[in-house]
Image (tube, rainbow, N blue to C red):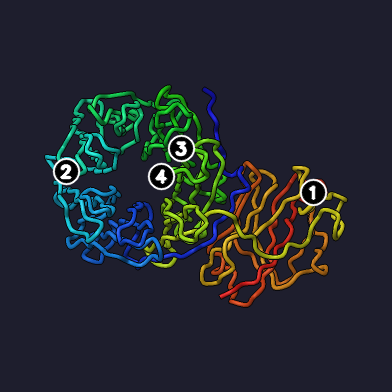
Amino acid sequence: MRTTTVLLCLAASAHAQELLYRVDSPGTEAFTRVIDNLGDVDGDGIDDLILGSRADSTGGLQAGRVQVHSGANGALIRAHVGTSVLENVGSQVVAMGDLNGDARGDYLICRFVAAIGSRSVEARSGADGSILYTHPGPSPLVSYNWLSVGALDDVDGDQIRDWVLGSSSPTHGIVIVFSGASGTPLHTLIGQSPDRVIGPFAIGVGDVDGDGFGDFAYTAIQLPSWYSRGVHVHSGASGAPLFVLQGGNGFGMGPDADLRLIVGAGDVDGDGLDDLAITDRYANNFAGEVRVYSSATHAVLRSFQPYCTGVVAPHSGEMLGECLTNLGDLDGDGREELGLGTSFSSAYAASSATGALVAKFRERRRHDSVNGIGGSSAVITINDLDGDGQREFVVTAPLMAQAPGASRFSVYRSGAQIEHGVISGFGDGSGAACPCGNFGQAGAGCANSTGMGATLHAFGSTSVAADTLYLEGDHLPLNKVTLLVSSLGTGGGGLGVPFNDGLLVCAPPIKRLTPTRSCDGGLSWWGSGLRSAGGWQPGDTRTFQVWYRDNQGPCGRGANWTPAVSVSFTP
């Protein structure tokens, strides 16, 4: 079967989403990756959220914290706060659906006390947060360094979701499947061999063998090198092995492999069996890669690569797949979309069927934190909040520029995008003449070395308080340095004046905002979080334009300009 590789920067039609609301954490919390959709726990008909913050120090140094929030408005419903130093409450949280028959979504909370190696998993009621049961974790506890927990579809026929635990140390590995209703172990796999440890990561992956029961997968590592030994998939009904995915082609093998996450991708190829998505965040020189595998043939159905980091040296890439989620079917095609998180505060929603980029999110500028790396982002969905019949996006991101450990989650409206501002300075012959007669296509700037003119559009929100304005450029020369600038006014009567190979619209004084680099598809974007560099206030109007390097440009002057976008800001 032919493999489709998707370069996420190519889908220029997927713009930033409109913000509905957001919730910022205190400086001691860090709910950047550990998030799940609980379903409705407060009875208002809207999905609610659970977030884990194992590094939170409210109850003691890294005691941890778990928060349950209303999906309707972000209000805090309850919190579970650790009370011991290095207790790490909330190292993982897992939505389980209704475990006790009260029609509320229940959940699992993981904790481990690093000083003594103690680990436990609590099942809690979504209705009131009370403990339904507790499992102490693998034994001997002190020998296990890693602990992962994931939900899986019913394996024992009681119509209640079950769960799987994976744990490993340098000498041992264990995977246990538990009854969701009672916490009773159903299957136990122990890996103890001279060259292999199982269980650093384990999760349910849907029904991959067509028997009507949920199945599970776990990663394995080779000793002493800690190289990946692939993803092992087992029957949930019997615990028997089904198949092993070994990666290949540099993916999931060797010293740079990090098969960090697995997720069930639904039936991608239409054969009636659920398929798998696997991430290797170290692939492609730390740019990351996510592959979707057929559970029937084990062939690669699709590969997602982020060749659009937009990061000026020295950073290698976004580590695409730092977080990986199943978003459900968002576009009604019967195939499920994937949520692709990164380590640079960017996140994407992409179609597993076509590879099209459904939405992208940039919660903050990458260079706001030390060395430009701001921690991980994740994206999930909740049910419709605005009455348009479409699910909304929830995105987590760090805010390390504001306070160490601070983070936020934001809820964005799906569906049609709103474009902002007035565009001027076209190089298509409708205004000022381009420097050497290098006119671009309608609505674009003067032509560059691609034979087309670049474009610039503004999306997100014009609210100063929200600070989510994004600007997106397209038809840029590939992999070139770009610079977003702004000004208070325009030159040449708004038509621009010839400069480099294009038309300069911004009038002095011009403020430099943020550099980035165009990706292999000629796309680049800037934002959000631009206000700190731009300094605008409610009622201000700013004109934005992008300068970009183009050594092979038609006029031979080494650079060019996009059209300009003038945006008026609201409170």
Other-residue count near label 3 (Cα within 10 Å), few / some / many at <14 / 14–19 / ≥20: many
Q: Are marks 4 and 1 in contact (CB under 8 Å)?
A: no
Asked whether, in this view, residue 145 is left or right of residue 293, the answer is left
N-term mark: 4 or 2: 2
Residue at image x 85%, y 60%? 431
Other-residue count near label 4 (Cα within 10 Å), few / some / many at <14 / 14–19 / ≥20: many
**Residue receiving disc 3:** 290
Q: Which mark is residue 183?
A: 2
Other-residue count near label 1 (Cα within 10 Å), few / some / many at <14 / 14–19 / ≥20: some
Other-residue count near label 2 (Cα within 10 Å), few / some / many at <14 / 14–19 / ≥20: some
Residue 169 shows in the view: no
Closer mark to the observer between disc 3 and disc 2: 2
Coordinates of residue 21 in the picture (x, y in percent): 46, 65
Q: Which mark is residue 441?
A: 1
Q: Tell me the distance, in whole angstroms, between the alpha carbons under discs 4 and 2.
A: 25 Å
Residue 39 shows in the view: yes
The vertical placement of 361 against 509, above or below, is above
Disc 1 residue type (three-letter): Gln
